[in-house]
């Protein structure tokens, strides 16, 4: 049974070599409060893999980092349909890293709006 709103393990970017390549060669951008990096490639099997990061530099307490990471994942999970549709139409594979770069713990609505803008910008690049 396919769950359209689930965030499966296969949708998470976990390969160390892929993460290194993304941070080294990826195109980057900024939408407050996120810095994001993307790599778009032609692929026989279209997919979107995402990495969520909240640096310890700005949020020392693990509970704050976990809260922010959960909000990021939930916002992405609810809005990922648009980017998945574009990758399927164009036969492209997308690696995306979202790095939270604000010193404040922002509410879910702000995070969700920023992720929507990021997904729209990435969809345009495809």
Image (spheres, rainbow, N blue to C red):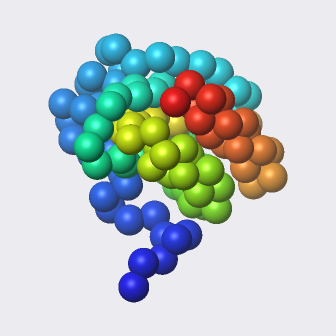
Image quarter of the N terminus: bottom left
Asked if residue 103 shows in the view, the reply is no
The picture places residue 15, in percent across and down from the top left corner, at 21, 41
Asked if residue 115 shows in the view, the reply is yes
Q: Residue at x 51, y 51 (%)?
A: 84
Where is residue 116, by image quadrant? top right
The picture places residue 93, in percent across and down from the top left corner, at 36, 39
The picture places residue 121, in percent across and down from the top left corner, at 65, 29
Residue projecting furthest to the front: 89
Q: Residue at x 40, y 19 (%)?
A: 26
Where is residue 67, by image quadrant? bottom right
Q: Residue at x 37, y 48 (%)?
A: 47
Where is residue 96, by image quadrant? top left
Q: Residue at x 54, y 44 (%)?
A: 86
Tell me: 15 left or right of 34: left
The picture places residue 94, in percent across and down from the top left corner, at 41, 37
- Tag count: 0
Of residues 52 and 118, the one nearer the viewer is: 118
Please say if 77 is above or below 16: below
Tell me: 125 left or right of 108: left
Tell me: 16 left or right of 43: left
């Amino acid at each position: 049974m396919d769950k359209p709103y689930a965030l499966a393990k296969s949708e998470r970017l976990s390969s160390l070599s892929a993460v290194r390549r993304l941070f080294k060669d990826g195109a980057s951008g900024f939408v407050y409060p996120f810095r994001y990096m993307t790599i778009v490639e032609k692929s026989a099997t279209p997919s979107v893999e995402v990495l969520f990061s909240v640096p310890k530099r700005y949020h020392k307490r693990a509970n704050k980092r976990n809260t922010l990471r959960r909000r990021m994942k939930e916002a992405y999970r609810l809005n990922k349909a648009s980017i998945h549709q574009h990758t399927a139409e164009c036969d492209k594979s997308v690696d995306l890293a979202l790095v939270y770069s604000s010193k404040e713990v922002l509410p879910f609505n702000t995070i969700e709006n920023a992720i929507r803008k990021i997904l729209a910008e990435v969809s345009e690049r495809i």
